[in-house]
Amino acid sequence: MKLPFALASRFVAAETLEKTLPVVAELNQDGLHVTLDLLGEYVKERSVAIDATKAYVDLLDRISKAGLNCSISIKLSMVGQKIDMSFCLDNVRQVMEAAKRHDIFVRYDMEGSDITQSTLDIFEEMYPDYPDHCGVVLQAYLHRTADDIARMCELNARVRLCKGAYGEPASLAYQDMDVIRAKFVGYMQQLLTGARYPGIATHDDKLIEATKTFAREEGIPASDFEFQMLYGLRPETQKDLVAEGYNMRVYVPYGTEWLPYYSRRLRERKENVWFILSTLFKR
Ligand code: FDA
């Protein structure tokens, strides 16, 4: 069954790139940086992974031609991570060559714990050749993240820090939100002092305040890091942060494969469910 896009339109910019680019331009006009995410994940067929690789390369060409302030976020599981490692590496390299040519940054989104290690392996494979054009995501809820943060600081890599959005077992991930918040704060402090231009990805006021306070106390300029939020969530707060002088990047998903992303957003907060239900009944 194909659900109507109207359901997802609070969190997803559009189903096509043509309709998404004006959304990016508008966000840029408000002083917001953007990262574009072509939706899709866990591809099992080579032909689909090849198409996704071409779509990412095309996306980089289009962003460059349009002159937008925009990076991209990619899912390695879309370009063959679950099929074959060397096939995936070839595909990622094609994307990275285009990114370097256009001087556009590529973030490797972090997915479920079954592919955390291979995502970091692929990043470490690419990083020496594209140190200014690729970065990873680390999830504060995973037990292993303490070690991964230390490694990324050692590499002086660019990391997006988030809580983590996938259902993970207690053997691998903290389940208690206060513990996850405390971990997030510790990692944020390590990244702000020990790594390059971290992205602090959260809508959580406590974590945003903790970041501002730490940066102020340590004399870390606002230009040395950025906040990141998802398209459709807290748009006024996003603009407020820009007005306060912070860098703010909005993660803008687009494309027809929006159902898994949309489901994760609904799971996160019951307010999101109410919003969607209310859109069902709006004309
Ligand atoms: P959370 O949803 O836990 O909310 C905590 C508090 O924040 C609330 O109690 C409320 O006070 C405030 N709040 C939140 N939303 C609000 C709203 N709409 N209005 C008012 N107050 C609100 N995950 C992953 O596993 N891999 C990835 O690669 C990424 N990438 C990513 C990029 C970006 C830019 C973001 C922002 C997030 C991700 N995530 C992610 C998702 C992330 O792991 C996490 O699931 C969500 O951001 C939800 O956690 P938060 O910390 O944002 O707040």
Image (spheres, grey):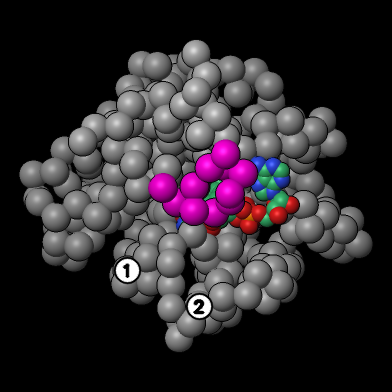
Query: How far across and how far down the image is residue 98, in percent?
Result: 32, 37
* Stretch of the chain drawn in magenta: 263-274
Please report the residue visible at 57 percent of the width from the left and 35 percent of the height from the top: 275
In magenta stretch: residue 270: yes
Label tally: 2
Q: Is residue 200 above or below residue 112?
A: above
Left or right: residue 88 versus residue 158 is: left
Q: Which amino acid does the dot numbered 1 rest on? A: Ile
Secondary element under disc 2, as helix, strand or loop, is: loop
Looking at the image, is mark 1 or mark 2 earlier in the sequence? 1
| Tag 1 residue | 115
Q: Report which quarter residue 61 is drawn in.
A: top left
State the residue position of label 2.
173
* Magenta segment, prevailing SS (helix, strand or loop): helix
Type of amino acid at the residue the image marks with label 2: Ala
- State left or right for residue 58 relative to residue 11: left
Local SS, label 1: helix
